[in-house]
Amino acid sequence: MSISAAQNRWLEKFVKLLLTLQGVEQESDNNDCRTLTITYNGKFNKINLTTLVSEIRDQKNQYSQIRNTLTELGIEEGKKLVPAKRSRNPMTPEMVTARAAQQKEFDAWQEAWQIIRQAEMSLDREYEISIMKDYY
């Protein structure tokens, strides 16, 4: 079963979000294939993404590989950020800025997880609709 252009939009949204994060670089970019290099907490990994995938099963496998890569890097889904304990001294403006940046980056990674899950649910719906069309 072929996938729709809507599925490629999920992938584009995911890539755009990742490229805004620190430690994520795009190594190669032709319109159909992208290689993203992710460095997170001293760990390094690559993700190969393609829009040439024409089967729902293949795109599900691609999202599965993305999930596995993020998990290997220590980026876990559904976690809450627990900042370091505050000292008795008041926080300096630099400390406040650093904590805000840390929270923003953490939230962006969690948003990436949400995009992956939404894309997978969309693929499941598309698959079920195609099965119903074939049946009726």
Image (spheres, helix red, strand yellow):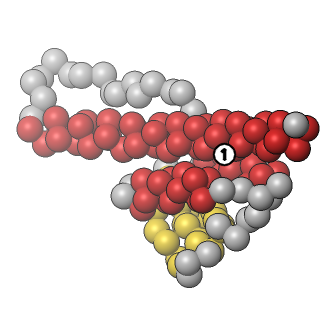
In the image, residue 67 above or below residue 47: above
Q: Closest to the observer: 35 or 126?
A: 126
Q: Identify the residue position indicated by label 1 in the image.
A: 67
Horizontal side of residue 18 vs 117, given as left or right: left
Is the residue 56 above or below the residue 120 in the image?
A: below
Q: Amino acid at mark 1?
A: Arg
**Where residue 28 sits: x, y (%)?**
55, 79
Say which quadrant the N terminus sits in: bottom right
Q: Is residue 85 above or below residue 27?
A: above
Relative image position of residue 80 (x, y in whole percent): 45, 25
The residue under the point 59% across, 71% down is: 35
Please give left or right for residue 82 compared with residue 35 in the image.
left
Q: State the image coordinates of residue 113 (x, y, percent, origin top left).
A: 55, 40
Residue 101 visible at all: yes
State the residue at coordinates (54%, 27%). 78
Furthest residue in direction right, as rendered: 135
Q: Quadrant of the C terminus?
A: top right
* Residue 102 screen position, x and y as percent: 32, 40
Q: Does the image show residue 28?
A: no
**Crowdedness near tag 1: few (<14), some (14–19) or many (≥20) residues, C-alpha within 10 Å:** some
Q: Residue at x 9, y 24 (%)?
A: 90
Q: In the current view of this chain or complex, which residue is farthest to the top?
A: 88
Q: Is residue 53 left or right of residue 74?
A: right
Compare residues 36 and 8 and report the one nearer the observer. 8
Residue 59 drawn above or below residue 37? above
Residue at disc 1, secondary structure: helix
Q: Quadrant of residue 132?
A: top right
Figure disc tally: 1
Residue closest to the eye, 23 or 109: 109
Give the residue drawn at x 71%, y 56%: 3
